[in-house]
């Protein structure tokens, strides 16, 4: 459950009507409403929300949404909406009916987009099939069953280079397995051996430099990777979760076609 959803669970109606907004306005408030409304801007809404949600996570972005009178509130890579008075917090999708677009989905995709070229590939386990001209990055945990299925699907792909950033986030012996794979003589062989055949490499030397694992964990937190596998395409867009070879092939072909047009 996300941090904002956990917070909202304490409200009277999750994602819509806070408990403090349930009480009817006192007469003084009704009289005050006849007075000219104060200027609404980012700073004023931030101040109001901070006062009314003191235990909420940091608000990364507060800005007008495409819908007049509605403000966008971004926490991490999560998008919510509020009214100009900060009295309501809405969790849901904003749809442009005329343009037939899911504006919330587009915004989340924008927030999740990564500059592929800036990824620290030296900290990844790398392997390729064919000429390797098509590249993807994957954040994976060795104890992740969905990661295993995805890794098996990748073996069917032609001309790909796969960069796997190991992040032991699932508990148990994930840290030990991750270190054993990273410290193996041939990391790609060790990774594929474990994921495809359940063959774990020997216990690594205590002197092995495994600092890359902590760097990968820090990177995953920075870009809000909350589960595995997390797949990043060369255009910076993500695929949340495992996909089959057919679906991935469609995405890669569409990406290649788009690159030819540009």
Image (spheres, helix red, strand yellow):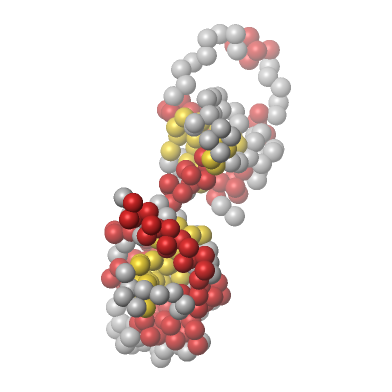
Q: In terms of depth relative to the viewer, which is nearer, 261 or 64?
A: 261
Which quadrant: the N terminus?
bottom right
Residue 246 can be seen in this image? yes
Residue 96 sits in quarter: top right
Residue 92 sits in quarter: top right
Residue 236 location, x and y as percent? 38, 55
How many circles with numbers are drawn on the protein? Answer: 0
At horizontal 52% and vertical 9% (from top left) the residue drawn is: 36
Q: In terms of depth relative to the viewer, which is nearer, 123 or 133?
A: 133
Left or right: 158 with respect to 20? left
Left or right: 227 with respect to 126? right
Q: Is residue 117 above or below residue 177?
A: above
Residue 71 location, x and y as percent? 51, 31
Residue 216 sits in quarter: bottom left
Left or right: 14 with respect to 114? right
Residue 123 location, x and y as percent? 31, 70
At horizontal 49% and vertical 32% (from top left) the residue drawn is: 65
At horizontal 66% and vertical 41% (from top left) the residue drawn is: 14
At horizontal 47% and vertical 21% (from top left) the residue drawn is: 40
Q: In terms of depth relative to the viewer, which is nearer, 109 or 174?
A: 109
């Amino acid at each position: 459950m996300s941090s904002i959803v956990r917070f909202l669970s304490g409200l009277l109606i999750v994602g819509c009507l806070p408990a403090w907004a349930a009480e009817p306005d006192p007469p003084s408030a009704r009289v005050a409403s006849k007075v000219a409304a104060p200027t609404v801007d980012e700073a004023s809404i931030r101040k109001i929300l901070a006062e009314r949600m003191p235990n909420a996570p940091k608000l990364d972005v507060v800005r007008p949404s495409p819908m007049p009178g509605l403000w966008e509130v971004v926490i991490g890579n999560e998008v919510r909406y509020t009214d100009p008075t900060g009295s309501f917090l809405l969790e849901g999708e904003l749809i442009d009916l005329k343009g037939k677009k899911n504006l919330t989905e587009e915004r989340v995709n924008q927030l999740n987009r990564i500059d592929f070229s800036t990824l620290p590939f030296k900290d990844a386990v790398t392997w390729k099939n064919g000429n390797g001209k098509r590249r993807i990055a994957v954040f994976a945990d060795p104890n992740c069953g969905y990661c295993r299925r995805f890794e098996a699907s990748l073996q069917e792909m032609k001309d790909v280079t796969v960069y796997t950033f190991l992040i032991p986030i699932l508990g148990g012996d994930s840290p030990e397995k991750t270190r054993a794979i990273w410290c193996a003589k041939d990391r790609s062989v060790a990774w594929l051996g474990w994921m495809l055949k359940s063959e774990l490499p020997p216990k690594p030397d205590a002197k092995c430099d495994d600092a890359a694992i902590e760097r990968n964990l820090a990177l995953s937190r920075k870009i809000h990777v909350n589960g595995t596998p997390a797949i990043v395409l060369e255009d910076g867009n993500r695929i949340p979760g495992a996909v089959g070879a057919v679906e991935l092939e469609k995405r890669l072909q569409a990406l290649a076609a788009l690159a030819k047009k540009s």
